[in-house]
Image (spheres, rainbow, N blue to C red):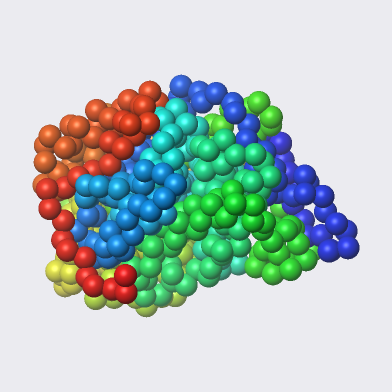
């Protein structure tokens, strides 16, 4: 890897294009290195993972609405169009990516990478797959494009924090998806450079979508970034340029949206000829909740089974989760969001409330993507009483481990201290989720397939489940004609509400 130093430059410094981060990203995209076997296997795993959560969300209102918008935009010119999960036929690729991106993101149940910034790199798959189908690419080209998308998003997340400045993490997704599309289509660095710049320029937004009363826009935000990336690539292919330098300019992203004119970042990117392996550093979710909640769910389930008395709020004085800065301030009591303790809160808010999640997992000994968020579950009096006894506190050591670059010590859990009403105390800790590569039960192909079968059951016909798995597991060798099979067709889907289109 090469560490690229990125800082703000005055306009009169005339920073050469070849020294700009967007150009370096474009060079990585154009580097036609072979995809290693382990990376190819993981790409297949994540395609199956995305399909699982998309299947489970087909009837949810944001997904129904986005699908309706895609249906209003049939294929026009330039290619064969792309598939939309849930329905048959082809549609405009940018709108197919939009609908599929919402379906993948709606349940907050696919993969994650956490470093200086956090991300869901599986959000790269819908736009890259949609363009692959539209452009007549084969499975090998799709594989290369997805590997690039993961590489760039993860490398940006390693080097540049967005949330520290209240910028939403999808600002890394627009450039990564554009880079992945550059690899897929074999574009020259100059074309991808302009696409990356345009995608970044059009996808920066505040983090209010993940604060307070969290709305359905949380699922739409990455879909918009993927759609914007496709449109940026289209414009760049037509010879249209981008704001330059987009990261380093004196009125650019770093100067005004991030650390400011005196800031500098270090972004690692693969050297020329170096394979793109970043996907191997990401991890999926066993439970439908914010990633920082994964380990806490596993610990709560275990504690509830070992100590059933902990499920009774009358027996508990207080529960404190000592954890990282990010967990405390984003999904913990440090956010100071009263909605995180409100039983009437939206599902999107509850899946960003670690006090709620810990209480329910402790009582139920399980976590379900539907039942655990049901209104009647959230409003159960004994749960509300227990929930309001749970708080979080930042712990410097867990913050250090959260930001560690050493995979062996990087951690997303913490230490729980439970004080009973009788004065006795219980202290336990967990570093990573059971499904994490270093966890008690690391996810492998069989786990991804089981997750897909579980979430698709009752949504897709048995024959459709088997058909999709048969296509997905052959992804690297699929022909262009076969790539259209990387979709899901339900026997029925809810009708879309009427909108403008």
Q: Residue furthest right?
A: 12
Q: Position of residue 305 (x, y in %)?
A: 20, 47
**For residue 244, what is the image quadrant?**
bottom right
Q: Position of residue 98 (x, y in %)?
A: 38, 57
Quadrant position of residue 204: bottom right
Q: In the figure, 361 relative to 205: above or below?
A: above
On screen, residue 9 versus residue 69, left or right, reads right
**Quick check: can you spot residue 43?**
yes
Instruction: Using the image, determine if residue 441 lies above or below residue 198.
Output: above
- Front in this rendered view, residue 236 or 181: 236
> In which quadrant is the N terminus drawn?
top right
What residue is drawn where x is 43% and y is 34%?
137
Toward the viewer: 116 or 87?
87
Q: Is residue 163 visible?
A: no
Image position of 488 (left or right of 144): left
Q: How many marks?
A: 0
Quadrant assignment for the C terminus: bottom left
Give the residue displayed 23% in from the left and 43% down from the top: 488
On the rendered structure, is 307 left or right of 356? left
The residue at 28%/59% (across/down) is 71
User: Whole-percent x and y of residue 446?
Assistant: 27, 29
**Residue at 50% in and 23% down:** 36
């Amino acid at each position: 890897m090469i560490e690229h130093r990125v800082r703000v430059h005055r306009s009169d410094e005339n920073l050469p294009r070849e020294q700009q981060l967007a150009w370096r990203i474009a060079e990585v995209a154009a580097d036609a290195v072979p995809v290693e076997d382990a990376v190819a296997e993981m790409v297949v795993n994540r395609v199956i993972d995305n399909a699982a959560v998309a299947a489970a969300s087909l009837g949810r209102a944001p997904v129904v609405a986005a699908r309706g918008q895609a249906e209003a935009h049939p294929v026009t010119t330039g290619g064969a169009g792309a598939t939309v999960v849930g329905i048959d036929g082809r549609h405009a690729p940018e709108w197919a990516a939009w609908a599929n991106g919402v379906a993948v993101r709606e349940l907050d149940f696919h993969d994650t990478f956490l470093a200086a910034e956090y991300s869901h790199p599986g959000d790269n798959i819908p736009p890259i797959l949609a363009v692959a189908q539209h452009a007549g690419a084969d499975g090998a080209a799709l594989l290369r494009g997805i590997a690039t998308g993961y590489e760039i998003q993860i490398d940006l997340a390693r080097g540049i924090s967005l949330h520290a400045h209240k910028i939403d993490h999808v600002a890394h997704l627009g450039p990564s998806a554009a880079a992945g599309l550059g690899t897929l289509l074999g574009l020259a660095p100059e074309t991808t450079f302009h696409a990356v710049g345009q995608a970044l320029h059009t996808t920066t937004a505040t983090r209010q979508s993940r604060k307070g009363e969290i709305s359905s826009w949380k699922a739409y935000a990455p879909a918009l970034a993927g759609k914007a990336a496709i449109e940026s690539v289209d414009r760049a292919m037509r010879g249209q340029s981008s704001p330059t330098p987009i990261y380093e300019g004196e009125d650019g992203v770093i100067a005004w949206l991030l650390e400011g004119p005196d800031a500098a970042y270090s972004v690692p990117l693969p050297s020329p000829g170096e394979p793109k392996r970043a996907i191997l550093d990401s991890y999926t979710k066993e439970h439908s909740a914010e990633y920082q909640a994964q380990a806490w769910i596993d610990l709560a389930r275990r504690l509830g089974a070992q100590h059933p008395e902990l499920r009774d709020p009358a027996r508990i004085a207080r529960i404190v989760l000592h954890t990282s800065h990010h967990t405390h301030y984003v999904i913990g009591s440090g956010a100071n969001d009263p909605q995180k303790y409100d039983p009437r809160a939206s599902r999107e808010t509850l899946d960003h409330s670690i006090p709620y999640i810990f209480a329910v997992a402790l009582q139920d000994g399980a976590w379900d993507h539907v039942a655990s968020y049901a209104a009647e579950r959230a409003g159960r009096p004994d749960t509300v009483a227990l929930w309001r006894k749970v708080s979080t506190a930042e712990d410097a050591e867990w913050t250090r481990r959260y930001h560690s670059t050493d995979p062996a010590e990087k951690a997303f859990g913490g230490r729980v201290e439970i004080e009973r009403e009788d004065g006795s105390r219980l202290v336990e800790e967990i570093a990573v989720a059971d499904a994490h590569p270093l966890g008690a039960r690391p996810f492998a192909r069989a786990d991804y397939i089981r997750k897909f079968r579980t979430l698709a059951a009752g949504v897709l016909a048995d024959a459709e489940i088997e058909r999709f798995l048969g296509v997905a597991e052959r992804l690297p060798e699929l022909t262009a004609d076969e790539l259209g099979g990387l979709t899901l067709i339900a026997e029925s889907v809810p009708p879309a509400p009427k909108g403008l289109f």
